[in-house]
Each structure stands twice: as C-alpha cells, then as structure tokens.
Image: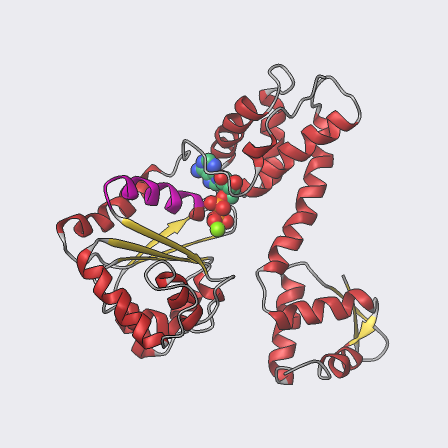
C-alpha cells in the first residue's frame, strides 16, 4: 500500500542523525576541549547551553560515539531521570559493581575514581539543571580526570550555585543558538529524503515548516512527521501546505507536554490543579495546592505559577476585584 511516511523511526526524538547539520563550530570546539583526554590529561569541563531543539543532546551524543570508537568510555546520563547525587553515582557505577550492590555512595564514587585512572572517560550530564544536587556533583566531579560535559537550557543553573561549586567549575561555555530557517530546511531535507516517499514533499513545504518552527529542530521534525501522517490519514497523494499548518498545531501542543515534563513535580501539581479547575482564583489554587504532599512555601508557589504563565502553559485573566483566574 502507498504511504507518504515510509520510515517513521527517522522522526523519533532519540534517532541519532548520521549528519549533524550546521553545528561544525560547536563540534570542533567540543572535540578540541576533550582532546587532552586522549593524552592522559584532564580536559576543562564544558557547559553547553541553548534553547530546546537547538541540537545540544544530538551533537554531544554524536561526539561521544566518535570518542567511543577510539577507546574512550562514554557515560550519558539524563538528570531528568537521575535527579540526585546518589542516583547519578549509582548509574555511573552500574556496570562496575555487582547488580544492586548496597555499598555506600562514597564507596561507589571512589570506585569510579579508580576506574578513571585506568581508562579515559567522558561523562555527560544532560538536563543538568534538573538534578537537585548539581552543586554537589560539580564540586566532586571536578576532582576527577575525566571529560565532563554539562548540558542545560541556560547558564542560570551555574550562576545560581553557591560560590564553592561555581568556582570549582572553571570550564568553558558553548552556546547553541536557535537554528535559522536555512539550517532547519537542511535538517528537514535529510529526514524527508530518508523518511518520506519521493515526490510527496517539496522544498516549499520544508520552507513553510522551517518558518513556523522558529529555530526549534524538534518542532520542525515533529511538524513534518505530523503533516505526513495527516496526509496519509486523508489518503492525499502528497503533503500540501495545509498539512504543514495542521501538523504544526499538533507539534506545538506536544511542545507543551515536553515543557511540562521538564518542570518540577510542584509545577506539575499546580498545572494539574488548574487543568482540573478551570477559572480557579489564586487564593483557592493556593489553598488546594498547600494540601498536597510537602508543598513549597507560598512565595515559591507564586514563582512557579508565574513560570507556568510565562511558558504559556497556564493563562491568567483578571477577575473581579484584585484576584486573577487561571486556566490551561
Ligand atoms: N544539527 C542537527 N542536524 C540534524 N538533526 C538535528 C540537528 N539538531 C537537532 N536535530 C534533531 O532535532 C531534534 C531535537 O534535537 P536535540 O539534540 O534533542 O535538541 P536539544 O537537546 O537542544 O533539545 C532531534 O530529533 C535531533 O535529531
Ligand atoms: Mg536535549
């Protein structure tokens, strides 16, 4: 049967592209910074920052693969999943110890330290800002002779650390700026060539998607996939511009889920409460929230609420008097 989307795998977020488009300067800089590792020296740590969808994770994974081919041990950890000092140390030493070993975190840390004396290691802490013990991690990992790469959406996490850990970092910063339209077209072209039936897409379609996506490669790729699915669903022979717009709408709502996934449990609780109670006023929201498990202080609650509004996840409207109402 004829389908437009011939290879859906190519559009998944964890698909590692064969070619990283237009990130050559960053790739060179990361490669160069990690080079000392191959001469048994300690490289400076790297702090990569940039908006979601700017290619941070894929670029670093791409370099990691290269390094593994020359004998470097690569360890990739997403701090969203491993969000404390000990869970990171556990994950690092997973393969070095008997499974479910009950040895202490410090014992494991020293075990890892010994390991790094024997073999070059690159450790990547992705979404570093999501680790609640990031200061402690930076502090202790700075002692080791390993290649350290932290990835985060901003520099803020590092700036907000206590001076002790901040001054320990002493590394280099690499920024990933949002892509321009031409970059996004190139990225999309690769996916279209390998994932869509020939003749079902045009350069004009990719241009339109690139324009809508505002620098975010994740959104662009998702939009293209959604547009293809939609056209398939309607039995269309090719992806017209109409499908690009429909696909973008869906990709944007996906971005919402993605953003929400990146927030703390407290943000999520607040969001869920607003979702369940459309039009709820601030006082009521606080009163419901404060009954949840281990609530944060009211000031922090207000800060989280403002962050959710700024991210476009919650809308706020003026109500009678001085109160405001909220809905998602
Ligand atoms: N330069 C690039 N070349 C090819 N694909 C890319 C590039 N940058 C990002 N992508 C793709 O876009 C999506 C999001 O990229 P990712 O590296 O996860 O971004 P970030 O970690 O900055 O949020 C992934 O599917 C990735 O494969
Ligand atoms: Mg990422």
Q: Is 138 a magenta residue? A: no
Question: Is residue 54 shown to the viewer in this render?
Answer: no
Residue 278, position in %: x, y? Answer: 83, 66
Q: Residue at x 39, y 45 (%)?
A: 61
| Render colour scheme | secondary structure
- Specify the quadrant of the image occupied by residue 116: bottom left
Count the numbered circles shown.
Answer: 0
Q: Is 62 a magenta residue? A: yes
Q: Residue at x 56, y 42 (%)?
A: 218
Q: Is residue 112 left or right of residue 188?
A: left
Q: Is residue 6 left or right of residue 43?
A: right
Q: Residue at x 30, y 70 (%)?
A: 109
Image quadrant holding the N terminus, namely top right
3 to 57, vertically: above or below: above
User: Considering depth in this image, is 32 or 110 the residue closer to the camera?
Assistant: 110
151 to 1, vertically: above or below: below
Residue 76, position in %: x, y? Answer: 39, 54
238 to 108, vertically: above or below: above
Q: Main secondary structure of the magenta part?
A: helix
Q: Is residue 150 left or right of residue 146?
A: right
Image quadrant holding the C terminus, namely bottom right
- Specify the quadrant of the image occupied by residue 200: top right
The furthest residue to the top: 199
The part of the chain drawn in magenta is: 58-71
- Specify the quadrant of the image occupied by residue 123: bottom left
Question: Is residue 171 shown to the viewer in this render?
Answer: yes
Q: Residue at x 63, y 83 (%)?
A: 294
Residue 232, position in %: x, y? Answer: 74, 25
The furthest residue to the front: 98
């Amino acid at each position: 049967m004829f389908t437009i989307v011939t290879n859906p795998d190519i559009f998944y977020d964890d698909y590692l592209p064969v070619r990283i488009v237009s990130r050559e300067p960053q790739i060179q800089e990361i490669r160069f910074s990690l080079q000392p590792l191959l001469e048994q020296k300690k490289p400076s740590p790297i702090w990569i920052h940039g908006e979601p969808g700017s290619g941070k994770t894929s670029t670093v994974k791409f370099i990691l693969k290269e390094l593994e081919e020359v004998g470097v041990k690569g360890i990739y950890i997403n701090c969203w999943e491993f969000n404390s000092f000990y869970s990171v140390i556990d994950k690092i030493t997973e393969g070095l110890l008997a499974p479910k070993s009950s040895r202490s975190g410090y014992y494991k840390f020293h075990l890892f330290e010994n390991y790094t004396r024997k073999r070059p290691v690159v450790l990547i802490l992705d979404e570093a800002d999501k680790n609640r013990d990031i200061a402690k991690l930076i502090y202790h990992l700075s002692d080791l002779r390993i290649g350290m790469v932290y990835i985060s959406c901003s520099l803020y996490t590092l700036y907000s650390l206590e001076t002790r850990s901040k001054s320990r970092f002493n590394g280099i910063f690499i920024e990933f700026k949002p892509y321009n339209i031409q970059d996004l077209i190139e990225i999309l072209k690769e996916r279209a060539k390998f994932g869509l039936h020939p003749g079902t897409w045009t350069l004009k379609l990719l241009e339109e998607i690139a324009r809508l996506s505002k620098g975010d490669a994740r959104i662009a790729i998702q939009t293209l996939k959604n547009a293809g699915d939609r056209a398939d669903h309607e039995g269309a022979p090719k992806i017209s511009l109409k499908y690009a717009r429909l696909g973008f709408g869906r990709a944007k709502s996906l971005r919402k889920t993605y953003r929400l996934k990146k927030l703390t449990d407290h943000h999520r609780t607040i969001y869920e409460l607003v979702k369940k109670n459309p039009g709820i006023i601030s006082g009521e929201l606080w009163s419901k929230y404060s009954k949840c498990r281990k609530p944060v202080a009211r000031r922090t609650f207000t800060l989280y609420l403002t962050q959710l509004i700024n991210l476009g996840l919650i809308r706020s409207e003026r109500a009678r008097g001085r109160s405001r109402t909220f809905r998602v």
